């Protein structure tokens, strides 16, 4: 499915390639059909915990992962992965709206899973929130 972003027209594969080539995220699943909408793409992404630990260590000189309990670490990983996903707007089409919601720390793969939505700037933010809520319940 193609979506116009201003002067650009991109499909799920184009967006997926941008994500994997220009970020630390891996596309786990294309969830675009699950949105039941023609004006947005959705993906399940993952980012390695080791990558998050490196970023945390660079940003916080005195931050020590071993000193945190699992709940604090979980919250830090979720917020950092969401922040990283939202930073992808730098290389995505200018005429786009994005949203990201981290939902799981997968210990077997040692990564954080999140849902990533992208729509044209004509998409209502309310609709994006509704779609995000629906996709999160599908993942959990």
Image (cartoon, rainbow, N blue to C red):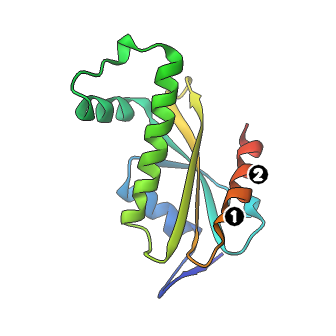
Q: Viewer-proximal residue, 25 or 124?
A: 124
Percent coordinates x, y for residue 42 in the rendering: 63, 59
Q: Residues within 10 Å of mark 1 (few under 14, many from 20)?
A: few
Percent coordinates x, y for residue 97 in the rendering: 54, 68
Q: Viewer-proximal residue, 114 or 1?
A: 114
**Residue 2, picture quadrant:** bottom right
Residue annotated with mark 2:
134
Mark 1 secondary-structure assignment = helix
Image height of 3 relative to 60, above or below: below
Q: Residues within 10 Å of mark 2 (few under 14, many from 20)?
A: few
**Residue 32, picture quadrant:** bottom right
**CA gap, disc 2 and disc 1:** 13 Å
Q: Is 113 on the left or on the right of 36, as rendered?
A: left
Percent coordinates x, y for residue 5 in the rendering: 52, 80
Tag on residue 126? 1
Q: Is 96 on the left or on the right of 135, as rendered?
A: left
Q: Earlier in the sequence, mark 2 or mark 1?
A: 1
Tag on residue 17? none
Mark 2 secondary-structure assignment = helix
**Where is the N terminus found, in terms of image quarters?**
bottom right
Q: Identify the residue at image location x=74%, y=58%.
A: 130
Image height of 112 relative to 127, above or below: above
**Residue 62, picture quadrant:** top left
Percent coordinates x, y for residue 4 in the rendering: 57, 82
């Amino acid at each position: 499915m193609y979506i116009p972003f201003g002067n650009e027209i991109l499909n799920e594969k184009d967006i997926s390639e941008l994500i994997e080539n220009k970020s630390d995220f891996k596309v786990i699943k294309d969830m675009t059909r699950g949105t039941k909408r023609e004006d947005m793409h959705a993906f399940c992404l993952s980012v390695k915990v080791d990558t998050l630990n490196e970023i945390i260590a660079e940003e916080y000189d005195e931050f020590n992962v071993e000193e945190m309990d699992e709940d604090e670490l979980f919250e830090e990983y979720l917020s950092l992965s969401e922040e990283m996903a939202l930073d992808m707007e730098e290389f995505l089409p200018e005429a786009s709206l994005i949203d990201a919601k981290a939902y799981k720390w997968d210990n077997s793969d040692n990564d954080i899973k999140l849902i990533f939505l992208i729509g044209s700037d004509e998409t209502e933010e309310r609709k994006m929130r509704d779609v995000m809520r629906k996709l999160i319940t599908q993942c959990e």
